[in-house]
Image: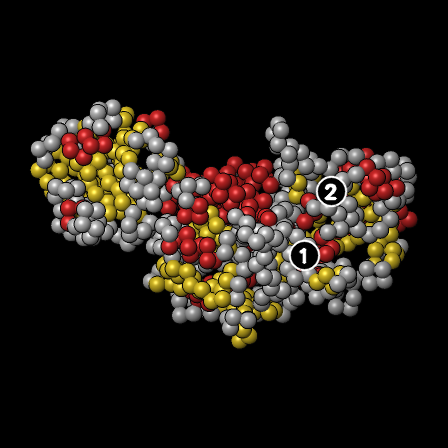
Amino acid sequence: MTLPRLSPDATPAPFDVQTTTFSHDVIGRYVCNTWDEITAAQASGGYPFDVVVIGAGMFGGYCAEKLYRRGSAVGLRILVLDAGAYLLPSHIQNLPQRLGGKIGGADGLRTRDNGTQNVIWGMPWISNEGFPGLAYCIGGRSLFWGGWSPRLTNDDLANWPKEVRDYLLSTQGYASTETETGVVPSTDYIVQTALYQALLKALQKAQANVKAVTVVSEAPLAVQGSSPASGVFPFDKFSSAPFLLDAIRDDASTNTAYGDVSRRIFLVPRAQVHRLNVTGKSVTSLDLSVNGQRQSLQLAPGCAVVVANGTIEATRLALESLGVGSTQFGSPRVGNLMAHLRSNITVRIKRTAFGLSPLAQELETVALIVRGAAFARRFHIQLTAADMAGPNPEANMWTMVPDIDLLGNLLANQDRDWVSLTFRCIGEMEDARSLPPDPARSWVDLSSETDQWGMRRAYANLVATAKDWDLWKAMDNVAFDLAMNLAQTPDNIQYWNQQANTWQPARPLPDANGRGFWQDRLGTTHHEAGTLFIGQAGVSGTDQDGRFHDVTNAYVAGPALFPTLGSANPSLTALSLARRTADAIIQRAGPVSQGGFTDLSLDPKDWQMVPTTPNVRVRHYGKVLETFGGYGLYWYVKEQFANFVLRLEWRVARRDDNSGVYIRIPAPTVANPLLAADTQGHEIQIDERGYDSQTNTEAHPLKATGAIYDLQAPTAFASRPIGEWNVYVIEALGPQVTVRLNDQLITTYKSSRQPSGYIALQAHHPTSRVQFRNLGIQKKP
């Protein structure tokens, strides 16, 4: 449904908050930008984007936040594009009870609830198996996921590249992600009640009787149930949405000088990316639709693109953009598609079997994890239990309970005699790491069916192998055996038959085809993975940083990178890899120190702005300095220099940006320091126009980039395109001054002015924003 742009007053609100009959779209307006706002910001002098993230879901939103936070030292500028709209600020289970049934869950895609239709979930691809599809909203499936976050074990990682494996097992990998998302401390929000202790003890005893079980431990759940620091509230169940939204608001509130022009991270909703356009070995533009209108986004050289819109959609983009006629995949079809083998076995066991009183005195909800192996493959069981009569022990888990009366109702509805347990079994699907893929295995290609924009949909072929069926059967048997060991006798246990909607005393059996009603379909886990797996060039899709082998600036975030799947839910591993990819992009985008040069201090106390009017200043983006606000000189006051080589990088955002590098100028404490700098020192000019304010004309040779201002014109125009970084090497030896721009000698001049002094950077006029980085000096005798 399309709503008109509305405002409750005759005069539009400053942020153009839209108002409907039911609500104010305050959060959506405060975190999202329109496409027109993005193009206007760029046209008004915004620097080119350093990264474009496609998808604001679990991994794209998280990666974008890391690019913003960790990329602050280099002033990284990020654009996030998502095909969905803003929906919720946090995980749905952090919201009031029962709201989730109205808008959440893929099962509600084609159903109505009291006349309210679920419009979030969609199925962009076609397949041989049924899939839940994607959540088209900011935060994506991270708003709805279960929260289970086990690590991949050493055995799971055996066929992963060693560098990636070592990273995941380091403090920078799993350990950092677990702390950040609330997995550590484990189950801190679940009170370890009598039921918890009894069940843990019973499982540990049963482990000796069920040989395939290797580990019994607390559940690794991404739920921060206690304060991480004094005075700080927990965020409850993890979603990437609050991370991304908070980064955007932090940026908007701190970079207020020029509004959107000076901001570093933007989010555009309803932006569907169709194709990455590659020139040579770089993505140079994107084809997309924003609010149903076709658009094109030109990328600056070096701009990174992170494809994070889900495994199958990311694969579609890769095939559409890189696959046909390319050596990237060697085939118009990509293999190694994996999901998980999943079963849900529910039983109820008498409380007395655990040595517990029939009368429940407190609200008891339990979560534990059981790991196992069979046929040299891994599985794990997510075990949840609660004192309740019904077959869903998770009914009250992770639920916000705002009042004491509701808590009393939950306690009153507990069952006096039974504990319900669900064994959610998740098994590793067999990998198939080959290029091109085996046609009899699982793969993704492009179908002949097109979407509403005329783009080919992906076709996903997901099949279980004979080895998969062997593991699936073994895994289910372990769950049934564990349940029987917990019950101790057949009289203590009943099994939930979801087909008959009743409890039954006998263990259910599979049908004639070996399938049990408790087994989910292959595509229902939301865990599709593997198609763009990490590995060596020629035998995999991406390198160890998640970058496509044949493309210099395109990366993947998400489970598509997994060489093998293991049994663990992919979120913890994929989040850790997304942070690794963000770090690789930041490192590549940052300045590289040159040997033989000493970095100038960027400590603000070592610099002084003259004049000191509020509007004229230099912003420090970590290792990047940006001039703005009006005319002034930013003196490096720590030290004077006589003979030296100064190397620095600079860039402009638009053609009329103006600045300069001053050398050998007097101290800022002299009378009329700005005039003294002009008359006693030298300015190496930065002005792509060569603008002469006296005649209001351009292309003045003594005022153009590379000129020693008003004294010596450059012999060539060697600047790179607007938005790209340029390198100045300025040498001052005795009276001789030489200037090299991008490795080209463009200016030589014999000076009669003072032989030593200070260095300064120029701020020129209110709308001029010039950036500098990698300032290094080499002193000469």
Q: Determine crowd level at label 1: few under 14, some 14-19, many 20+ residues with C-alpha closer than 10 A.
A: few
> In this orientation, which residue lies closer to the viewer: 335 or 614?
614
In percent of the image, x 57 and y 59: which residue is there?
5
Any part of residue 185 in sight: no
Q: Residue at x 32, y 45 (%)?
A: 768
Circle 2: residue type:
Met
Image height check: is 461 above or below 56? below
Picture residue at 21% right of the left edge, 51% below the top: 696
Residue found 54% across the figure and 38% down from its top = 176
Q: Position of residue 451 (x, y in %)?
A: 55, 71
Residue 547 quadrant: bottom left
Which residue is the site of mark 1?
A: 21
Residue 100, given in percent of the width and then of the height, sits at: 71, 52
On the rendered image, what quadrant is the N terminus found in?
bottom right
Q: Secondary structure at mark 2?
A: loop
230 relative position to 397: left or right: left
Residue at image mark 2: 400
First in sequence: mark 1 vs mark 2: 1
Residue 218 lies, with reference to residue 490, above or below; the image says above
